Image (tube, grey):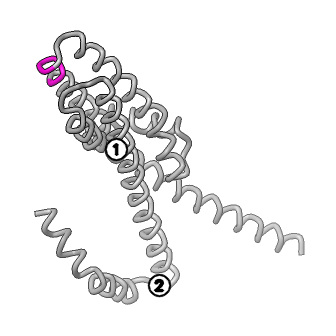
Amino acid sequence: VAVIASIYMLIDKERLKKGIFRLMGIFLKEKRANSITEHAKRINDIFTNYLYSRLMCSIIMAVVCSIVLMIMNVKYALILGLFIGAMDMIPYFGSIISFVISLIVTFITGGVWKGVWTGIVLLVLQQIDGNLLGPKIMGDSLEIRPLWIIFAVTVGGALFGFMGMLFSVPVLAIIRAIMSDYFTAREMKKMSEESENNE
């Protein structure tokens, strides 16, 4: 239902926008309506950048894992690499699931030692992706330090499980943007008051 509703919302995007703006114009003052519109646009940009950065991480992981598994002569290397990349879109759980399935397939098709070496290589690649590459790409895209991204995902997962891990980073970016706007407004107000007092 959500997917179908999303498709219809995208089709009627312009009409929905006009309706929302009309309602805001009726019930809200112009300044408040402009503020809400600006924040909604920033939230949309944050989620778009978050999805873009996760997609970039997934593509990089898919390419790197496919190449490495091909070099190791692992059977179904391309399929496994693409699967690992696709599952990388899901924080933490995706990496675990793709690791276990890739390990099982390699054990069955290549034997114990190939499975062991494949497991070690995939574990190293996923650690680099989860602790270095992912936080770096998302940090640059969302203007958040990588350390805060790791912290947000960890705390979000501990408090709210899978959904917490999935949405913790964009929520942190939204909170950061709102707080930044608030502090900027407070600073400008303070400077204005000090300027008036000096006069």
Q: Residue at x 59, y 57 (%)?
A: 180
Q: Nearer the viewer, residue 113 or 140?
A: 113
Q: Residue at x 70, y 68 (%)?
A: 189
Q: Nearer the viewer, residue 127 or 65?
A: 65
Give the residue type that dot 1 points to: Ser
Circle 1: element type:
helix
The residue where tag 1 is placed is 58
Q: Is residue 164 visible?
A: no
| Image quadrant where residue 154 sits | top left
Residue at the right extreme of this rendering? 199
Find out whether residue 98 is within the magenta segment.
Answer: no
Q: Within 10 angstroms of label 1, few (less than 14), some, or many (20 or more) residues?
A: many
Q: Which mark is residue 125?
A: none
Position of residue 58 measured from the top left corner of the image (x, y, whole percent): 34, 44
Q: Nearer the viewer, residue 175 or 28?
A: 175
Position of residue 197 measured from the top left corner of the image (x, y, whole percent): 84, 70
Circle 2: element type:
loop
Magenta segment = 105-109
With 61 as the anchor, is 45 left or right in this view? right
Mark 2 vs mark 1, foreground winner is: 1
For the N terminus, the image quarter is bottom left
First in residue order: circle 2 vs circle 1? 2
Position of residue 109 measured from the top left corner of the image (x, y, whole percent): 13, 21
| Image quadrant where residue 102 sits | top left
Q: Residue at x 37, y 48 (%)?
A: 54
The residue where tag 2 is placed is 29
Position of residue 55 measured from the top left corner of the image (x, y, whole percent): 35, 50
Q: Is residue 131 above or below residue 90?
A: above
| Image quadrant where residue 14 sits | bottom left
